[in-house]
């Protein structure tokens, strides 16, 4: 699995079966073909973030007080949120909008064969 992350500081690349990214002011694009993605941290104010996995779970672990709107899509997995105060709007079984705070950061999460989870740290 290769994950590419384009950020204001440049591009990062990681190769592994499982990727875990942790940081502050996170923004950018994280992709994998086969493997899970866990992103933990603070989203940059007004950030645009995209997490994509063809075959693997995607977990977004946000700090208390986060503000984001997450558009989640999965073909054959589940979408769940246990972040305190998260508002979940189901579009269909395969698609949901998860909002925390005022939704300042925009996050797109896509997985073909995997679960999507929004949780707190």
Image (spheres, rainbow, N blue to C red):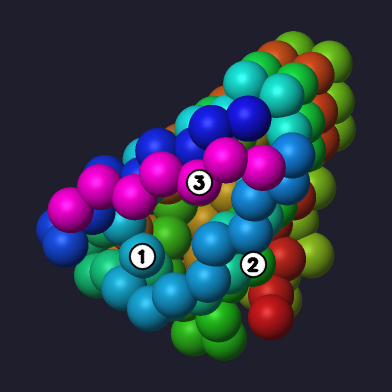
- Give the image location of residue 119, x and y in percent: 72, 66
Q: Which residue is mark 3?
A: 14
Residue 77 image-quadrant placement: top right
Of labels 1 and 3, earlier in sequence is: 3
The residue that disc 2 covers is 61
**Left or right: 44 with respect to 38?**
left
Q: Nearer the viewer, mark 1 or mark 3?
A: 3
Question: Compared with residue 33, is residue 31 higher up or lower down, i.e. above or below?
Answer: below
> Which residue occupies 38% across, 78% down?
24
Highlighted magenta segment, given as a residue range: 10-16
Furthest toward the bottom, the residue is: 64
How many marks do you count on the picture?
3
Q: Residues within 10 Å of mark 1 (few under 14, many from 20)?
A: many
- From mark 3 to mark 2, how far is it between C-alphas? 19 Å
| Left or right, residue 81 beside residue 54 | right
Element marked by disc 1: strand
Disc 3 to disc 2: CB gap under 8 Å: no
Residue beneath disc 1: 26
């Amino acid at each position: 699995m290769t994950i590419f992350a384009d950020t204001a500081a440049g591009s990062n690349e990681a190769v592994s079966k499982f990727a875990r990214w942790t940081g502050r002011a996170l923004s950018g694009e994280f992709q994998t073909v086969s493997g899970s993605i866990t992103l933990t941290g603070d989203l940059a104010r007004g950030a645009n973030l995209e997490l994509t996995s063809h075959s693997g779970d995607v977990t977004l672990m946000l700090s208390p007080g986060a503000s984001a709107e997450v558009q989640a899509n999965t073909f054959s997995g589940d979408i769940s949120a246990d972040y305190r105060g998260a508002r979940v709007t189901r579009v269909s079984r395969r698609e949901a909008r998860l909002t925390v705070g005022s939704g300042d950061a925009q996050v797109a999460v896509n997985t073909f064969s995997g679960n999507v989870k929004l949780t707190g740290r």
